[in-house]
């Protein structure tokens, strides 16, 4: 059987070196250092700057302005119909006049997802140093297809969800959940080495940072 | 600048270690293939410009990370840790994937991997699949095998699409169409892509939209997907895939069945190791702080992701590389392709020259990977370790600190050894011994390199070295080399 054959070759190849313990020096930065961000406000500012670098739109709002900002963002795009995870906090869409929101509990058809004008979700964590939002399918995030098929993704990030570095995010996230790390809109370097939007994921990403 | 010629005469034989796709012809050795590539000046220009852009992006992204050297050292250690207990990690991975509802398959060689994947696709009863091409799926010649089995494959990547429509092979294992500029891709799309808008311009944005429109229906309705992944985490059974365009997300989100083909070396011990590799890979590969998308998934999911997950673990010569105490470091490779964009030989010849040598991985990593996994009995494989100027730039940028020049020298020695039975002791043996000695120590290496630079400049005419004298003539045969810069990269680097 090939399983045995491959494992046997691995063992034979390693010989005496097999099982040698290698110590992994982890003296890279686990948190942001002073130059990058000293205070909490710096972390949030760094996140916004880095998200914008990916050519995503980023806006800061107070908690009380969230519903109007979500509505304004959708009106600006003339969105008629959007999809949201069915556990999205009701308040986020409270001002949504003239826009129909489909609540998805895992049953909305792909063809419908392809036809809607966008999707609104929250996130599980965000990383300042890389300008990344991470979705894990948990509360207010929905299943993966929801943030993949529609062409526009509006993602709400609470300031306290933003960590400084990748190590902090990895420590916070659960690998048994379906994780999607999103750093800007879908982009390809394939066609001339300029980062252009596309090809398959949402070509537009808008991030709202909620500061309480 | 010291280098041995390729021993002659060289029989054209196929690599003995498998990996040959059905019906593939004998492979020309590097020098022959490179000469053809060198003749295509348009391609050389695009490639040179692209490599300069990639170098710039990588440099900026790594300079920004103040802890870059610490990350590289940690990355090296994580990969060595993976490799030195590879058997244990593979068994742990198998257990974790199985516990999470997936199935693990083992393939000793490319033919077996093809058989497994074709069998899995057949079992679904579908005749269409979508695929994110990866170095591993290319290595096993999967597309041809699927086509042979009557399965229709749609690629998700725009560059893969362009390369296939143009009837070419990829020139670069991360950016397959990097040798073609947007105007050429536009022409290919217009000529060969059904439904391409007739007013298509060469704006990359429009090209991306055209590819999207062409592929969208297939992707949204696919039931079976085949992909590679960057890493497999043993501890949790998690598969990790960074990407730019979302084609991978399509594959692991919508179809019911997902088949993931991985090299056995791609396993890493624990989830926490991702905090290192997910920083090293995007900055090295495309000069991004993070790839636009990184997806991770563990096993199957009723609602979110594949309901049926198959992981195919491929050896195909990797254990042969693992057996070499020096050469095994090549298996640390995380496929960032940074060594390609700094390589003067790659930049001038392009990936096709290496591909013709039997290699999927091109550039410096290809030159150390292919001879080790396929053996050096074939002329093409034996010539690859000589496809280098040993300038050292590749080793200096590698995010997992693979000493590529050191391994190249080591493999040159092995090639020479393998041909020792020949009656007259080849002169390159003496050269290699001297070179290995000189390379063994930085204090000896740099003066030696400087000396080489001095006489190479003397030989050059108009900044080009066309042919070196004597036994080194063979080496310049396909290498219309620029004269080396006055200061070798290594020296300049240290003097910064
Ligand atoms: S050898 Fe190093 S630099 Fe080259 S592709 Fe592999 S990881 Fe990247």
Image (tube, rainbow, N blue to C red):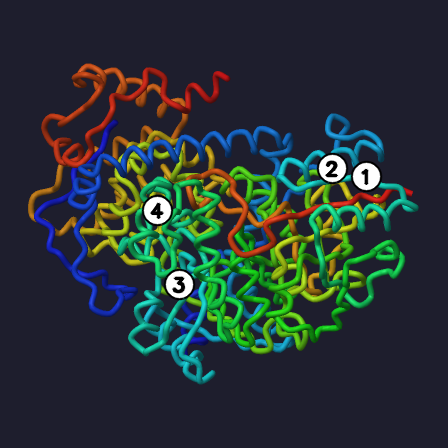
Image quarter for residue B20? bottom left
Q: Residue at x 57, y 28 (%)?
A: B63
Label 4 vs label 3, nearer the camera:
4
User: Does residue B102 appear in this view?
Assistant: yes
| Protein chain holding label 4 | B
For label 4, being within 8 Å of ligand 1 is answered no
Q: Residue at x 84, y 57 (%)?
A: A93
Q: Are marks 4 and 3 on the same chain?
A: yes
Question: Label 2 belongs to which residue?
Answer: A48
Task: Dividing the image into four quarters, tell me where ligand 1 lies.
Answer: top left
Is residue B83 placed above or below B140 in the rendered structure? above
Badge 1 marks a residue whose secondary structure is strand
Mark 2 touching mark 1, by CB under 8 A? yes
Neighbour tally class for label 4: few under 14, some 14-19, many 20 plus, Cα within 10 Å: many
For the residues labelled 3 and 1, the Cα–Cα distance comes to 44 Å
For label 1, being within 8 Å of ligand 1 is answered no
| Protein chain holding label 2 | A
Residue B40 position within the rendered picture, expressed as x and y whole percent measured from the top left:
21, 39
Label 2 vs label 3, nearer the camera:
2
For the residues labelled 2 and 3, the Cα–Cα distance comes to 38 Å
Label 2 vs label 1, nearer the camera:
1
Mark 3 touching mark 1, by CB under 8 A? no
Label ID, residue B185: 4
| Protein chain holding label 1 | A
Question: Label 3 belongs to which residue?
Answer: B137
Question: Label 1 belongs to which residue?
Answer: A60
Q: Are marks 2 and 3 on the same chain?
A: no
Is residue A2 placed above or below B400 in the rendered structure? below
Neighbour tally class for label 1: few under 14, some 14-19, many 20 plus, Cα within 10 Å: some
User: Does residue A19 appear in this view?
Assistant: no
Residue B133 position within the rendered picture, expressed as x and y whole percent measured from the top left:
42, 59
């Amino acid at each position: 059987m090939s399983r045995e054959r491959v494992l046997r070759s691995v063992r034979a190849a390693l010989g005496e070196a097999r099982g040698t313990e290698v110590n992994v020096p982890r003296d890279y930065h686990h948190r942001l250092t002073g130059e990058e961000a000293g205070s909490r406000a710096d972390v949030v500012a760094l996140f916004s700057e880095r998200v914008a670098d990916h050519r995503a739109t980023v806006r800061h709002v107070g908690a009380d302005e969230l519903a109007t900002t979500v509505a304004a963002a959708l009106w600006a795009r003339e969105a008629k119909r959007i999809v949201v995870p069915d556990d999205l906090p009701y308040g986020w869409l409270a001002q949504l006049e003239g826009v129909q929101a489909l609540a998805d509990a895992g049953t909305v058809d792909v063809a419908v997802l392809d036809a809607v004008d966008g999707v609104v979700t929250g996130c599980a964590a965000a990383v300042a140093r890389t300008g990344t939002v991470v979705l894990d399918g948990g509360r207010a995030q929905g299943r993966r297809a929801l943030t993949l098929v529609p062409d526009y993704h509006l993602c709400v990030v609470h300031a306290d969800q933003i960590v400084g570095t990748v190590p902090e995010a990895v420590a916070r996230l659960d690998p048994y959940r379906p994780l999607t790390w999103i750093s800007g809109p879908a982009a390809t370097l394939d066609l001339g080495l300029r980062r252009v939007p596309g090809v398959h994921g949402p070509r537009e990403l808008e991030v709202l940072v909620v500061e309480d | 600048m010291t280098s041995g010629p390729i021993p002659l005469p060289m029989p054209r034989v196929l690599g003995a270690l498998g990996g040959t796709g059905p019906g593939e012809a004998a492979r020309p050795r590097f020098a022959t293939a490179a000469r053809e590539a060198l003749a295509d000046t348009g391609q050389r220009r695009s490639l040179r410009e692209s490599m300069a852009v990639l170098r710039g992006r990588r440099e900026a992204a790594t300079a920004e990370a103040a802890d870059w050297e610490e990350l590289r050292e940690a990355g090296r250690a994580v990969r060595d840790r993976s490799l030195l207990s590879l058997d244990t990690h593979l068994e742990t991975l198998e257990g974790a994937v199985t516990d999470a509802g997936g199935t693990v398959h083992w393939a000793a060689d490319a033919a077996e991997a093809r058989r497994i994947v074709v069998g899995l696709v057949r079992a679904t009863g579908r005749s269409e699949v979508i695929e994110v091409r990866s170095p591993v799926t290319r290595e096993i010649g999967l597309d041809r095998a699927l086509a042979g089995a009557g399965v229709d494959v749609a690629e998700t990547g725009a560059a893969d699409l362009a390369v296939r429509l143009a009837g070419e092979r990829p020139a670069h294992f991360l950016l397959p169409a990097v040798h073609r500029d947007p105007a050429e891709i536009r022409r290919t799309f217009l000529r060969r892509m059904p439904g391409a808008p007739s007013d298509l311009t060469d704006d990359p944005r429009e090209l991306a939209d055209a590819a999207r429109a062409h592929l969208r229906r297939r992707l949204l309705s696919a039931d079976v997907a085949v992909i590679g992944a960057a890493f497999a985490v043993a501890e949790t059974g998690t598969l990790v895939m960074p990407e730019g365009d979302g084609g991978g997300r399509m594959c692991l989100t919508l179809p019911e069945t997902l088949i993931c083909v991985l090299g056995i070396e791609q396993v890493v011990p624990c989830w926490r190791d991702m905090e290192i590799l997910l920083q090293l890979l995007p900055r090295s590969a495309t000069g991004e702080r993070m790839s636009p998308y990184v997806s991770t998934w563990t096993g199957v999911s009723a609602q979110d992701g594949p309901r049926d997950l198959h992981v195919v673990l491929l050896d195909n010569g990797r254990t042969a590389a693992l057996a070499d105490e020096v050469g095994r470091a090549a298996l640390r490779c995380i496929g960032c392709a940074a060594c390609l964009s700094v390589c003067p030989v790659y930049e001038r010849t392009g990936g096709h020259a290496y591909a013709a040598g039997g290699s999927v991985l091109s550039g410096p990593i290809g030159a150390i990977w292919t001879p080790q996994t396929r053996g050096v009995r074939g002329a093409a494989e034996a010539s690859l370790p000589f496809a280098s100027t040993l300038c050292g730039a590749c080793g200096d940028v590698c995010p997992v600190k693979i000493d590529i020049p050191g391994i190249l020298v080591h493999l040159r020695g092995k090639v020479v050894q393998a041909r020792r039975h020949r009656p007259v002791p080849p002169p390159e043996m003496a050269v290699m011994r001297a070179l290995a000695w000189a390379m063994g120590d930085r204090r000896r290496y740099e003066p030696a390199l400087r000396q080489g630079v001095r006489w190479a400049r003397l030989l050059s005419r108009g900044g080009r070295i066309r042919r070196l004298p004597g036994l080194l003539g063979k080496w310049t045969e396909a290498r219309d080399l620029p004269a080396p810069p006055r200061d070798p990269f290594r020296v300049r680097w240290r003097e910064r």
